[in-house]
Every structure is written in structure tokens, then in C-alpha cells.
Amino acid sequence: MKKGDHLFLVDGSGYIFRAYHALPPLNRKSDGLPTNAVLGFCNMVWKLMQDARNTDVGIVPTHFAVIFDYSSKTFRNEFYPEYKANRNAPPEDLIPQFGLIRQATVAFNLPCLEMEGFEADDLIATYCKLACEAGADTTIISSDKDLMQLVGPTVGMYDPMKDRQIGIPEVIEKWGVPPEKMIDLQALTGDSVDNVPGVPGIGPKTAAQLLEQFGDLDGLLARAGEIKQDKRRESIIANADKARISRQLVTLKNDVPVTDGLDDFVLHAPDGPKLIGFLKTMEFTSLTRRVAEATSTEAGDVQAVAVTVERADTAHGPDVGSGAPVSTGTNEAAQAAATADTARAGDTPSLLSALRLEAASAAKIEPGAYVAIRDTATLKTWLAQAKETGIVAFDTETTSSDPMLADLIGFSLAIGPSRAAYVPLAHKSGAGDLLGGGTLENQIPVREALALLKPLLEDKSVLKIAQDAKYDIVVMSRHGIDIAPFDDTMLISYVLDAGTGHHTLSSLADKWLGHATTPLKDLAGSGRSSVGFEQVDIDRATAYAAGHADVALRLWQVLKPRLAAKGLVSVYERLERPLVPVLARMEQRGISVDRQILSRLSGELAQGAARLEEEIYGLVGERINIGSPKQLGDILFGRMGLPGGSKTKTGQWSTSAQLLEDLAAEGHELPRKIVDWRQLTKLKSTYTDALPGFIHPDTKRVHTSYALAATTTGRLSSSDPNLQNIPVRTAEGRKIRTAFIADKGQKLVSADYSQIELRVLAHVAEIPQLTQAFADGADIHAITASEMFSVPVEGMPSEVRRRAKAINFGIIYGISAFGLANQLSIPREEAGAYIKKYFERFPGIRDYIEATKAYAREHGFVETIFGRRIHYPEIRSSNPSIRAFNERASINARLQGTAADIIRRAMVHMDEALEKAGLSARMLLQVHDELIFETVEAEVEATIPVVRRVMENAPMPAISMSVPLHVDARAANNWDEAH
DNA sequence: ACAGAAGCTTA
DNA sequence: GTAAGCTTCTGTT
């Protein structure tokens, strides 16, 4: 072995156990011999060997060996008999597989090593050292932490089941110490599985911190008296000998007197017939076939090696496909087309819709007709034709799903069915090239292409069609192009069919065109091995990208007429389409987030959580994973036998906050600490630690992404990051909001609707008492309580108001006695009585609920007061619980959806109103009933009345509500104080 | 690597 | 009892 060689050492014993537990049980068909771990092992080794032949992927081994434990007794037992003494015997169906896996190794022509008295890990350590001395690199195929001490500049690990490389940084990331300190860390933490004692009360976090402070274990033990925490200091002093013996146990022996030399491990090409013989014996048909193909062996000619399992194996490929794909869309297409009689197209919207649908299902998609445009002359021809036609579908291809980070790689155009083209701009070659690969030839320079494209995209006389136009609008806006006018097939579908499924290009193509789109991962791969779109081959990119434009155009042809046919044009044109540029601007603006505030909070939360962790470990008596509901449930209700346990639907003990709160109220100490720990770790992981990662490198602001068509009710959703669930209820959580700040000289203005859904309820259900109460500006929950319980509002006990408030919210959610009982922690009978009483006092609400259910049952959808439709196709289900769920959802949808429509209208009108008032305020965020703006300090006082006016009058002139809307607004330097 | 469950955050 | 999205753990490829 020499420098440049690469040794692969497979931890065979470690892999056997992991594969056995990870893979479903598998038995040889002919005699029931258990083989799941054997198959897992063979697949893994085969994949490693295949990768070895593929120089494009990963690391290429030149030497290869598989290493096993000889027996459970090793030299460690001589000085510590308890070592691994508490190991259970392996499962019965694993035992026969140990021998089989050794035979598999031999069948693969690989060295199969083991030595009496030593663990596999010791052999691995020894060969690592030898390889290192020879100047070669080593990769250990394992993810066992016991081996991480071996990681170094020339030694890495690879976890084949998670496809993860483990190097020095990964060890530090996982354990907080570099590999050379892993021994000391393990000596401190111990290992309950291997019965390594360690120091009680010291886990990986504490151990890492101590090693950081004291350098190494000897330093720590020598200066243990300096440790501040009493318990920790005492434990370490008292258990110093345990730590030392633990260190001996976990230190791998790297001078095992091995007999084989590294040169015996040279990797040879697999011996096809030998390997296939074994695989056929195991009856692994699929792997046999793959090996046969790869080794050019005729599997049928190879005999299975063991006489006991003689079987005529046919190693031919499986049949693929079973006729034409069936899609719901083709049925619907056929139905709709059938309603079209002989009248001419265009006579009525319904007829046009039907004819379009018929045409769409008839016109097959022909990717062969797509062209790649690679010179300006051709591009100009296409752009001219698009201008002539007046309609063009447009789609961008980029490097990221986040439009603020996406680099433009190309764009596609479609001007008629199958008349689509892709314009590659920045495709590159050479995926593995350290220089990133050069830009490919024969691509129009980006600036030149965009200069030609800009007039078309901004041409008022040319309609641009896009699927999810907001994405393309943001990307092109960053290149100085304002796409207008446009239609969005995703939004048209959303208006037509909210509640019936997703509105992605692929689902719409399947539903309406009976066409299966190619997933991006087929071109660019997925996960760790994925590449940017710039690496995708231009021919494949053309089929993909031009296909998207083609499909979008066809969908538009089918869907657009349906808007008119169903009376939904105004919903689309007033509530959906105009919101797209508004949201695009909000996303591009982003909001400033103070890194330092979050960092300080993160530190505080970490400290609080660490303190609670130690306290919890103390109470539990061992270092459980507090984040594991499974372990928590077993400890609380199993070992500690706490009362009141309930099970989740999967049979696990429930450890919900509600349940733990109840236990805490009974005086139990542990549940309270767990609830507190959860709050701190939640705030830390979801907010203080995650948010800084979203700060944009250029703008230094956080740009969320709003989804327009993700909810059934018409609400927006926010993601990457979600800025609609920033904490507000607790004082601790609200601190997160102080990190959302206005820029220097500016203020944040927050304006939120007060009780908007209850106001909508009062309006649509026409409830005189509620309408009056809102008109009077009264306390709505107190009025409700007063009506129900005949008590005066003055001096009302807070508990009475609380119950009325819960009922009001319950109505909005489609009330049930079960849910109300849960919310108020009262018996279901009592909750039922409240509801009955409520309906007696507010009969209009019962009428409203019944009318909504009847309407939904009859039509399969409900509508908001602005005409938005929300479908509930399962409302006629014969399953009572599904039916009841859909009834509650439909009751809620009219209210939540109407409120969503109102704020959408406000947002659509807001920018123009501000501009007309000469104000520079910019809308940044929407949180369902709240809008957040940023404006210069001097304009705050002028801005608030304008914002309030637009929001409060948002339903006008479409609807004049019988209930006034009320908006609270205030300004401050951060979101916490503004809210 | 990915999916589902459990849990928690918001309106 | 409604509507969302994100993180961690767990089991399975």
C-alpha cells in the first residue's frame, strides 16, 4: 500500500445489527431462513463496490476489508468483567445471519477479518494506523461513535445507511470535541449499552464543556476541585477511578498482532459467477439481476451454491407498466366534454370551457417539438411571434426554490400547444470540477437575452401566463423586469377548486391534461447528491423547461374559461391576481432582524435549558433524552407510575403539555420542568437559532415566502421562515419579537383587526345583539356572557367571561360539545348544556350553522361573502366523524375565508392609498389579521390613519357590512412594542 | 434520506 | 372544535 491508495474498512458487526433493526423482516421463500440483514449487507457492499468503479462519485477505494467481532469476550473483560455484560442475546432470527454475512463477504471476494480476544473496532484501529503509516487514506464504513476517535486528516467515516460522511468537522459538530478528545469524552459519559460506567451525571454536553475548560481528562481529574457546580465537582472527584477505567475500555487497541497485511486487501473486480451463486442461494432476485448485468454474467447459467436451496431462478427483468395511466382528469374531461353539444365554441362560457377541455385532452404533448434557442436571431423570431399572438407562457429555471437567492439559468416560452422553447443562459459543464465548470458554449449572454426579453414581458398588449407567477416576478424583478400583465394558472385553479387538492403544475397537468410531468429530481438529483439547474444537461433542461411553459399554456386555455363559467372571475381578478405583485414586493423588502439580540437570547435559553436538564436528570435518575416523547412517556407513566396517563393514537404514552400541566398542578415536580424545558428548547431551536440563517447575504434582511394557494380557506401561509407564528403569548417568547426591528430613522407600524371573525359572524348570521355590541364598541365576550347567564357586565367574574369567550371561539371553529369540554376542562354534558343555552339566546347562529351545513351538503362547497368558494368533497361521507369534521370546517371556512378576503382587499388597495397620501410606508408582513409596515419616523402619525382607513373600509364597495370593522394600530422600534 | 408522529408556535 | 409551518425523534430504506 502506498500514498494515494484508499482503504475501506467495513465495520461488519456494527452493520449487522443496524441492518437487522432497520430493515423489515425477510425470509427466504423456499425455507423461511431469515435474511434481512444479509440482504442489507449485500446491497450495501455492492453499492460501495459499484461506486468504487464510478470515478465521478465520491471516494474510490483501492483496498477493501470487512471486519467482524470474533466473540463477545475480549481482552477488556480481563480487567473489567462487567464490560458489555448487560448485553442481551441477539434476536433469534439474527443468529443464523452472522455466518451468512461472513460467507457473503467471501462471495464478494473481500477479506473477512476477525481475531480472538479483540473487537472489530480494535482491528479497524490497527489497520487504520498501518494505512496511515503507509501514507494512504482510510474510510471506515460505520457510524459508531466508538470509532470516531480514529477520525483524522487521512481517516474518515461513512455511514452507508444515511449516506453521510463523517470527518473532523462532523465529529466536532455532533459531540462538541475533536476526534482526539473522543476517548476522554466517552470516558466521562460512559455507555449504558456497553456497560462502560463513566461519571454519573455527566453527559456529552457537560463532558465537552469540561474538556474544553480543562484540556483533557487528566487535567480535569487533577483540577476537579475548581469546578463550580457542587454536584458535578463531587461526582467527578468521587468517580475519578470510574473515569480512568472507562478510558481504558473505550480506547481502541491499534497494535493488534494482525496476520494479514494491507497488501492482502487490494480490491479486485467481483467474481460474477461466485457472487451470483451466493446471491441465488439467498434468493435475492433483484440484486442477482443487477450483479448479473454489471458483471456481464448470465445468471441462468450459475448454480446456487448450496444444495439445500436448489431453485430454478429466472433472472430476467420485470415487466414495466401496465397500459395507459388512468387519471381522474381524463374522466372529468370526458364528462365535461360530453356536456358540450353541437353549438359553436364561444356561445357560452360553460360551452367554451367544455370545448377547451375536450381539445386539451385530444392534443397530445410532444416534447420532441420543443426547441433550445441558442442564438439571438432565433430568440427574436420567437419573441416576435409571441408579440403577434398576444399570449405567451413564461417560466424561469434557476438554482434555488427561494426567488431571493435564485440565479437565473434559463427561461422558457410557449406560444401554442407544443410550440415551446427553452433559452439556456448559464448552463455549466463539469460537475466535479473544482473550478465549478466553465459556462457552456452557444448560450445567449444573460444581459443580451434579458434585454431582448424585457419589452415582451413588460408589453401591456401581451398576456404572460405563468404557474406560480410570484416566483418568476420576484426573480425577474431582481433583473429589472416588471412582468405585466399576467395570469397565473395556480391561482386560477385555486379560485376554481380550493379544497379539492393541490395546485402545483404537476397535479394540474395530471388532473386536466392527463399528463405526468417529470420531477426535477430526475434531472438534478435529490439530497446530498443533487446539483443546481446549471449542471443539468441542456437537452434534458429543454424538455423539462419548455414542457412547463407548454403545460402552463394548455392549463390556462382549459382553466381560464371556467372562471367565467362558474362566476368566479371577480374573485380571481380582485382577490388573487392583484395580490401577487403586492406580495412580491413584500417578500423582496424583507424585514430587519437583529442578530445580536437573537444570539443573546439563544445563550440565555441554552443556559436555562441546561439547568433544567440537570434537574430533570436528577429527578429521573438517568440521562434520558428529554426531547423523546417515547422515553419521557416510559419514564413518567411506566417507571415512575404517575397517574392520569393516556395514549396517543399509535399507542404511545401521551406527554402533551396539557397533560403535563395537569400533573404539575397535582404537585409533581418533574412535569413542570419538562414543560419549561420544552418551551426553552422550542424557542431556541425554532426561533433564536433558525432565524439568523435566513438573513439574506446581500440585503441583510429576512425575506419570508408567502403562499397564496396553500390553504383551503383563502388565508395566506408563510414559510422559509414562517413569520406568521413568531411567539407572542408568553413573556419569554415575546422577546423574540424584539429582534424584529425597524431600520435607523424608521419605525415599525403594526395594525390588526380586532375580533374580525366574530364581526364577520355577526354580519353573515345577522345577530342583532352582537351587531349592536360591536357598534357600541362593547366587550363582546362579556356581552355574550351577560346574554347567556343573565348576569350584568359590570362586576362580571372573569371565569364567566372566559367561558363565554371559549364558546365564541368555539362557534368560529364549528363548535362541538367534545371540543368545548376539552377547552374548558369541563364534562361534556356541561359543555353541551352551554351550547344549548347559547343557541337559545342566539337562535340566528344556530340557523346560520344549519344553513351552512345544508348548503355545503347540497353544493359540495361554501362561499365567503365575496364569493370565494371552498370545496368540501367529503361532506357527504357516510363516515360520521369525517362528515362532522367537514361540517365544522365548512362553518369555519365561511368566517375565516371572509376575514382572509377582507385583509386581502386591504392589501391590494394599501400601496396605492399610501402613495396617494404621499406616504413612503412600506408593507412588510401579513399575519392573518395584522399588517406590519416600516416607515420613516416623521410619517408615523400620518400613516396610521391611512392604514386604518384602508383596512376598516376594505369590504367596500363590494360589500357594506352591518358591523363596523375596528383596527388597532401603533408604532415602535420593534415588533414586540408595536404589537 | 425521507416520512410520519408528536409536539409547539401563530391567528 | 378551524387554519397553517417547523423541529425533533423514530422507524424504515
Image (cartoon, coloured by chain):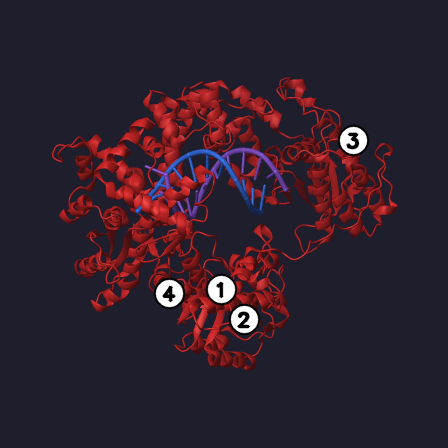
Chain colours: A red, B blue, C purple
- Can residue A931 be seen by looking at this rendering? yes
- Extreme residue toward the front, this view: A342
Amino acid type at circle 1 is Asp
- Mark 3 → mark 4, Cα distance in angstroms: 66 Å
**Disc 3: which chain?**
A
Q: Which residue is mark 3?
A: A31
**Disc 4: which chain?**
A
**Which corner quadrant holds the N terminus of chain A?**
top right
Marks 3, 2 in one chain: yes
Helix, strand or loop at disc 3?
Answer: loop
- Disc number lying in front (3 or 2): 3
- Extreme residue toward the left, this view: A794
Mark 3: give few (<14), some (14-19) or many (20+) Cα within 10 Å.
Answer: few
- Disc number lying in front (1 or 4): 4
- Mark 2 → mark 1, Cα distance in angstroms: 11 Å
Q: Out of A877 and A959, give the one closest to the viewer.
A: A877
Q: Which residue is mark 4?
A: A569
Marks 2, 1 in one chain: yes
Q: Out of A87 and A958, give the one closest to the viewer.
A: A958
Q: What numbered label is drawn on residue A614?
A: none
Compared across the picture, whether A472 is left or right of A10 comes to: left
Marks 3, 4 in one chain: yes
Amino acid type at circle 3 is Asp
Q: What numbered label is drawn on residue A407?
A: 1
